[in-house]
Image (spheres, grey):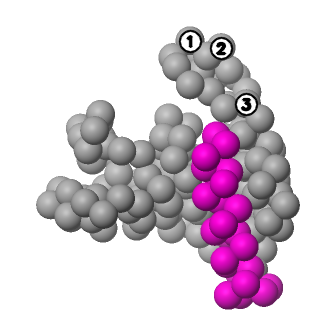
Amino acid sequence: MRIFLSAGEPSGDLHGSHLARALRQAHPGVDCVGFGGERMEAAGCRLLYPLCRHALMGFVRVFAHLAALARLLRQADAFFEEQRPDAVVLIDFPGFHWWLARRAKAHGIPVFYFVPPQLWAWAGWRVKKVKRTVDLWLCSLPFEPTWSRARGVS
């Protein structure tokens, strides 16, 4: 089994490292690979790119790195086609991850959002995007499952 994990900031790297360890403990042969940081790498995730080293917040910083993010999307797209992971797990970092989810879905790969962005607080209008690109929304706060189900999100 091959799982593509992606975290773009230090908190996501921490959650991703716990997930990678749990997956490897439950399924010793699982291959965890993707974008992340030092913690995920220490947990046994093979990094294609250390995305957490370049955590981007704010429009200006993201805009300045659009070419690099586009290269990463192309790299992920090639990986999805050539290595065909069994699932893609996205951890927070919504701006980039919406695009990554679209690429995974284009290849027919199931997409899971682990520690999803808090749409209930700032972007409820993005629920349509979630329904199109994410197969399972793994909530992290106790009220999120009710909020998500009420909007038709699995």
Q: Which mark is residue 60?
A: 1
Residue at 83 percent across and 57 percent down: it is: 41
Which span is picked out in magenta?
1-29
- Identity of the amino acid at label 2? Ala
List x then y, in percent, for residue 109. 55, 66
On screen, residue 3 versus residue 89, left or right, reads right
What SS does tag 3 mark? Answer: helix
* Magenta residue check for 32: no
- Identity of the amino acid at label 1? Val
Q: Are marks 1 and 2 in contact (CB under 8 Å)?
A: yes
List x then y, in percent, for residue 5. 66, 59
On screen, residue 134 versus residue 43, left or right, reads left
How far apart are the alpha carbons under marks 1 and 2? Answer: 6 Å
How far apart are the alpha carbons under marks 3 and 2? Answer: 12 Å
- Residue under numbered circle 2: 64
Residue at 66 percent across and 77 percent down: it is: 22
Residue at 28 percent across and 38 percent down: it is: 121
* Rendered image quadrant of residue 43: bottom right
Q: Which mark is residue 153?
A: none
Q: Quadrant of the N terminus?
A: bottom right
How far apart are the alpha carbons under marks 1 and 3? Answer: 14 Å
In the depicted structure, whether residue 132 falls above or below residue 50: below
Residue at 68 percent across and 20 percent down: it is: 65
Task: Look at discs 3 and 2 and give the one toward the viewer.
Answer: 3
Closer to us: 67 or 124: 124
Crowding at label 3, few (<14), some or many (≥20) Cα neighbours within 10 Å?
A: some
Mark 3 or mark 2, which has the lower sequence index? 3
What SS does tag 1 mark? Answer: helix
Closer to us: 5 or 131: 5
- Residue under numbered circle 3: 54
